[in-house]
Every structure is written in C-alpha cells, then in structure tokens.
Image: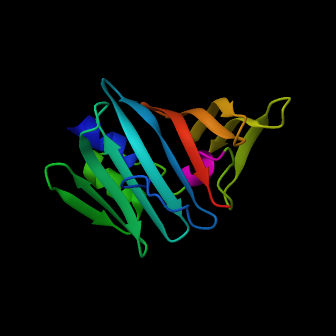
Amino acid sequence: MLAAIAVAAIVAGCAAVPREPPPAEGFEMTGRVAVRHGAESATARMAWRHAPAFDELMISSPLGQGIAELTRRDGVYSLQTSDGRRVSAPDPEALTEEALGWRLPLAGLPDWVRGRPQPGHAAETRYGDDRRATLVRQLGWTIEYLAWDDATGLPSRLRLTREALDIRLAIDRWVTAP
C-alpha cells in the first residue's frame, strides 16, 4: 500500500479528466508513473488537473481501479486512499512525509512537468540543440527530459531522482488552456 500511496503523492493533482477545458494557466495530463524508493516499487496510471488555485490527481491501478486521490484547495493538500484514509496538511512535502515517510517536491512539479525550473529557486538547466530542456537540477532534485511531444511542445517522458527515490513519468495526453 505504501508504494500505491507513493505514486499518488508524486503529482499534486486530479480526479477524473474533466470534459471542460482546463482553467487559464492550467493544464490536464494523463499518463503512467513508475516509482522506486529503495527496494519498493510501484506503477500506476494518473490523471492530473492543475490550476493556480487547485490541483486534483487521481491515481489508479494499471487496470483502472482507483488507488488514491490527492487534492489541493485553499492552500491545503489532502490525500485520500482507496481504503478511506485521509491525511491533510498545508505543506505538500509535510503531507507526503506524514503519509509516506519521505518528502516529495509537489510544489515544483507543475513547472518541472512543463519542462522548466520552478521560479524563485536557483536551478541548473541544460538545453538540447532544439532549445528544449534536457535536464534541470533544482532543490536537490534532478529532472531529466527523455522525450518531448512535438504537437504540444511539452515533455512526454521524464525522470525525477533524489537520493533513493526514482520517479518516471510517461505522459500520454496533454490539454493546456487556450
């Protein structure tokens, strides 16, 4: 169960992918995530809806069964598991530490999945010949951009690492605000 919750905490984000367009400066994405922390590992599907005012993330098994939902509203992050357990905190890293035993960079992830460093924090960024980021090092994390979606200009495969934590994201679908 720890591995399933770990997957849920990776992206601060989405219930089901809604039919209406994402809010201004927001996005929706669906895809797959694989997490390895020490000897534990897990894979899951995810749907994330992000906006400046909220995040909704639904994590489900590869067969579509709901595992966990992570939300952010009014500055409070909440994580609810399929067994009904609910944990809330104003700090996303504190929430993941309480629920998982280690901290995840949920505040920086909305920028990192879009191929850019989080504003306001020192970062080392490397770019390829196509001027797209190939690597960002920030806040103790290394984010590698393994593939980009030419249609959207957004990353389609990423790897985030820090100490014994290895997170791989494969983004199947992006929807951005008009």
Asked if 95 appears above or below 37 in the picture, the reply is below
Residue pictured at 83% horizontal, 37% vertical: 131
Residue 62 lies in the magenta stretch:
no
Residue 97 on image: x %, y %: 33, 51
At 86% from the left and 29% from the top, the residue drawn is 129
Horizontal and vertical percent for residue 138?
A: 63, 46
In the picture, which quadrant includes the N terminus?
top left
Q: Quadrant location of residue 157?
A: top right
- Residue 52: x percent and y percent? 56, 68
Which image quadrant is residue 35 in? top left
Is residue 41 visible in the rendered image? The answer is yes
Give the magenta-colored segment's residue range.
109-114
User: Residue, x 48% and y 56% (percent of image)?
Assistant: 49
Direction from residue 143 to residue 166 in the image, left or right: left
State whether residue 11 appears in this view: no
Q: Quadrant of the C terminus?
A: bottom right
Q: Residue furthest bottom?
A: 74
